Image (cartoon, grey):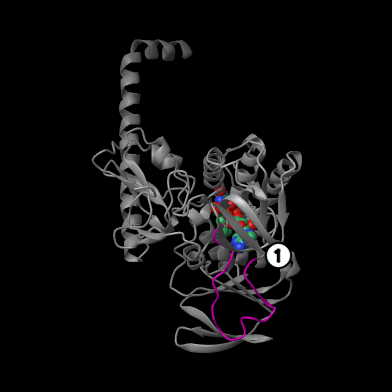
């Protein structure tokens, strides 16, 4: 019997091979067609829900150059937010794009340009050169404050800014420091390493703690981390793509110790003046002169407030460090982005027995990624969390909050309010020290 089968196969090998290829080809075409239809629906749905304007740096795809290879689609770390529709790549979920920029790197046809804002929705940014120098000679901006999120971008930009600053130092000026770095997140860490590498006299300060935004994440929060090439420390790579905030901060801490970085925590930058060709840097710990200044302030220094009565009560906070501190409490989480949804997930864990309400101003959670949306919807289904859409807090009291939910005004018990409604960009402050802010309408950063 076996002999017969093998004989049949050998006689009809060519025919079987061609049939298999036709079948696979047909299957592939069918799969692509289905994905294209799904992508189209997703895209239309985004437009219907007014979720078609990206909030950050995002890819602009030139359909005349796109050959539909799909390299950008498969490489996007945010999932299926880019899709092939009729053999052309389309950003189908624009509000989910966080500007990783890998799509641009992998496109073999140079069909993708990363841009800020759209023709109808401008995005304000400090005006910078390709070396991240501002309109004020010798004053640089690196990291998320310059408009691009993500750790890898912050590290790369700060490295470039520091190298440029170091190359253009006027060694004859007498100053306390050659380079003064403000902010000790990934950008500040990278700038400090670049200065240590080139043996410059520098100081890095942070009003809070070393680690920047990552430090203020909840305990054990997962961070997506691509390999990052730091100055001096070299390539920092983890065995997995997703790691905990603690793992990441531990590695950064080891780098800080190993290279004896000159970083001071708990010192706030308050102002900047020209002193001859150098700068006078004003801080809560005293004033310093420096030849060059690199601002790595990030964008979360000043959280946006609700501006409602009672917001100054101690039970109101703008980050969540240790979720386990909150148990058997009535909690309101305000916001609809990833930070709010993640905080709500931690606080609604069944073992904590909290009563958590997620208060969402609009009728959707458009800014958050699909995973986070699914997770909070699951918690809602399990009865561990309530989501109140079209709702906003009107007043915060010691033991309660007043919430406008649709047309109703409700008074509900409350022990803690967590607010995650974004941050105020320090543009007024930057303009005050001479940095020009410009609005980009679908343009690259350096146009
Ligand atoms: C919920 C959430 C999840 C994220 N997840 C990821 C992820 O998985 N992967 C990823 O790559 N990125 C992620 N990001 C983005 C990432 O955290 C930022 O892009 C990155 O931290 C920016 O680095 P930075 O150095 O520019 O600024 P930051 O990390 O924000 O650091 C800025 C520092 O400046 C300090 N500072 C501000 N003002 C002053 C002042 N006046 N004086 C002194 N110090 C000051 C602050 O205290 C802060 O420590 C996430 C962000 C959020 C909010």
- Where on the image, by quarter, is ligand 1? bottom right
Is residue 274 shown left or right of residue 127?
Answer: right
Furthest toward the left, the residue is 64
User: Residue 192 versus residue 257: which sits nearer the camera?
Assistant: 192
Q: Which stretch is magenta?
A: 298-319
Looking at the rendered structure, the number of numbered marks drawn on it comes to: 1
Residue 30 part of the magenta segment: no
Residue receiving disc 1: 323
Residue nearest the viewer, comparing 224 with 352: 224
- x, y (%) of residue 295? 56, 54
The quadrant holding residue 399 is bottom right
Magenta stretch: dominant secondary structure = loop
Q: Secondary structure at mark 1?
A: helix
Q: Nearer the viewer, residue 447 or 386?
A: 447
- Can residue 141 be seen here? The reply is no
Residue 207 in percent (x, y) is at 67, 61
Res 297 seen here: yes
What is the x, y in percent for residue 364? 44, 68
Callout 1: 10 Å neighbours few (<14), some, many (20+)?
A: some
- Tell me the residue at 47%/66% (across/down): 365
Q: Which residue corresponds to the image point at 38% horizontal and 56% vertical from the top-left?
A: 94
Give the x, y percent position of residue 25.
32, 30
Most foreground residue, 99 or 28: 99
Q: Is residue 327 above or below residue 95?
A: below
Looking at the image, which residue is at 71% across and 76% down?
Answer: 329
């Amino acid at each position: 019997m076996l002999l017969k089968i093998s004989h049949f196969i050998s006689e009809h090998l060519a025919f079987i091979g061609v049939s298999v290829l036709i079948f696979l080809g047909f299957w592939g075409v069918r799969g692509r067609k289905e994905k294209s239809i799904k992508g189209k629906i997703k895209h239309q749905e985004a437009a219907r829900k007014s979720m078609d304007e990206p909030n950050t740096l995002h890819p602009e795809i030139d359909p005349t150059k796109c050959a539909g290879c799909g390299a950008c689609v498969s490489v996007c770390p945010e999932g299926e937010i880019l899709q092939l529709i009729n053999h052309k790549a389309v950003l189908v979920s624009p509000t989910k794009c966080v500007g990783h920029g890998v799509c641009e790197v992998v496109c073999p046809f140079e069909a993708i340009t990363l841009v800020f804002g759209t023709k109808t929705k401008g995005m304000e940014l400090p005006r910078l050169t390709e070396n991240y120098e501002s309109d004020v000679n010798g004053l640089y901006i690196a990291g998320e404050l310059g408009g691009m999120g993500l750790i890898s971008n912050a590290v790369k930009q700060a490295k470039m800014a520091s190298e440029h600053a170091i190359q253009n130092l006027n060694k004859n000026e007498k100053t306390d420091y050659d380079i003064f770095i403000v902010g000790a997140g990934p950008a500040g860490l990278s700038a400090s390493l670049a200065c240590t590498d080139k043996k410059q006299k520098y100081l890095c300060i942070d009003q809070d703690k070393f680690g920047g935004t990552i430090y203020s994440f909840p305990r054990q929060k997962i961070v997506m981390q691509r390999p990052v090439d730091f100055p001096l420390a070299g390539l920092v790579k983890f065995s997995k793509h997703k790691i905990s905030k603690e793992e990441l901060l531990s590695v950064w801490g080891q780098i800080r110790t190993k290279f004896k970085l000159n970083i001071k925590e708990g010192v706030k930058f308050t102002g900047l003046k020209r002193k001859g060709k150098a700068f006078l840097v004003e801080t809560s710990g005293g004033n310093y002169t420096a030849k060059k200044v690199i601002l790595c302030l990030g964008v979360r220094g000043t959280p946006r407030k609700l501006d409602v009565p009672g917001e100054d009560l101690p039970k109101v906070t703008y980050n969540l460090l240790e979720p386990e501190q909150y148990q058997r409490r009535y909690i309101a989480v305000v916001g609809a982005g990833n930070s709010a949804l993640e905080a709500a997930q931690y606080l609604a864990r069944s073992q904590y027995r909290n009563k958590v309400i997620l208060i969402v101003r609009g009728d959707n959670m458009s800014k958050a990624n699909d995973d986070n949306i699914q997770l909070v919807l699951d918690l809602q289904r399990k009865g561990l969390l309530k989501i109140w859409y079209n709702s906003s807090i009107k007043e915060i009291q010691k033991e309660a909050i007043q919430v406008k939910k649709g047309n109703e005004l409700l008074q509900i018990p409350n022990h803690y309010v967590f607010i995650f409604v974004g941050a105020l960009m320090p543009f007024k402050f930057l303009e005050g020290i001479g940095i020009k802010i410009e609005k980009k309408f679908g343009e690259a950063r350096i146009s």
